[in-house]
Amino acid sequence: MRTPRTSTRRRRRSGRTRAIISLGAVAVLATGLSVKGTFAFWTDSGTAQTGAFSSGTLDITVNGQLAGQANNGGSTTIASLALGNMVPGESVAGSFPVANAGTVPLTYTLTGTGSGGLAVTNGLQYSVTFGATAANTGSAANGNRTGTCGAVTPTDANTTLLTTAPSTFATNRALAVGASDTVCIIARLNSNAPNALQTLGGTASFLFDSKQVGA
């Protein structure tokens, strides 16, 4: 009678053991499923933007005039550079600023062209000085009116402005932004002017042709 009881207990223990093993297998399978699930990946991004771009302006002014792009290629009159009833050897001087009113550095070339009866050989002659202020002395009554630019005095070697081609007085003079040149011009009636020049008149045009540095 004892032997059957022992056999039943063993069978019960074996059943419990199988149940535990079975649960362990389920746990392993569950863990495998969690490994194969979908993960959320964090992301981030950044953007680099440039600063603002703008073009500069090239703007040369003469005697405080002709500022702005609307006056590009414009002209102004230097009233002090005029003298009537001149006799041979008399002269007049006028000075004025030429400035860079733009936002980029520039260089300029100065040329002159004459017009009228005195703007021919043995007529009006011109000299240009930079950095000097004009001074005028003498009187029409004495026929000795004289214009000077600092220590510079006019001579017969001064330039005659022709109507056919411009004469060059300066090439590629540099002006930084906000900088200026004082330009002094002397106009003189040649001391050897012939009688044929009596009663004649003339004018001159001085062109300040600017461009950006490096052009």
Image (cartoon, rainbow, N blue to C red):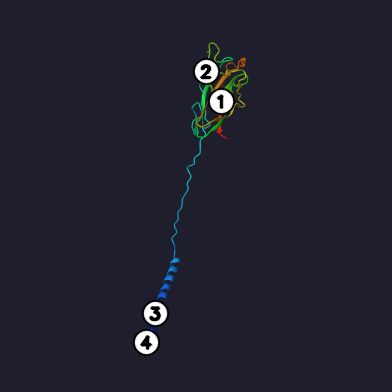
From mark 3 to mark 4, how far is it between C-alphas? Answer: 17 Å
Q: Earlier in the sequence, mark 1 or mark 4?
A: 4
| Quadrant assignment, res 12 | bottom left
Q: Earlier in the sequence, mark 2 or mark 3?
A: 3
Neighbours of disc 4 within 10 Å: few (<14), some (14-19), many (20+)? few
Q: Is the C-beta separation of discs 2 and 4 under 8 Å?
A: no
Report whether residue 201 is seen. Answer: no
Which of label 1 and label 3 is nearer to you? Answer: 3
Q: Position of residue 65 (x, y in %)?
A: 49, 28
From mark 1 to mark 4, how far is it between C-alphas? Answer: 142 Å
Query: Which is more toward the observer, 20 or 170?
Result: 20
From mark 2 to mark 4, how far is it between C-alphas? Answer: 148 Å
> Tag 4, which secondary structure?
helix
| Quadrant assignment, res 113 | top right
Q: Earlier in the sequence, mark 3 or mark 4?
A: 4
Neighbours of disc 1 within 10 Å: few (<14), some (14-19), many (20+)? some
Q: Position of residue 201 (x, y in %)?
A: 57, 19
Q: Earlier in the sequence, mark 2 or mark 1?
A: 2
Residue on which disc 4 sits: 2
Neighbours of disc 3 within 10 Å: few (<14), some (14-19), many (20+)? few
Report whether residue 20 is seen. Answer: yes
Which kind of residue does numbered mark 4 sit on? Arg
159 shown above or below 212: above
Which of label 2 and label 1 is nearer to you? Answer: 2
Which of label 2 and label 3 is nearer to you? Answer: 3
Q: Position of residue 174 (x, y in %)?
A: 55, 30
Which kind of residue does numbered mark 2 sit on? Ala
Which kind of residue does numbered mark 3 sit on? Arg
Query: Which is more toward the observer, 16 or 32?
Result: 16
From mark 2 to mark 1, how far is it between C-alphas? Answer: 21 Å
Query: Which is more toward the observer, 37 or 73?
Result: 37
Drawn side of residue 201 relative to residue 43, left or right:
right
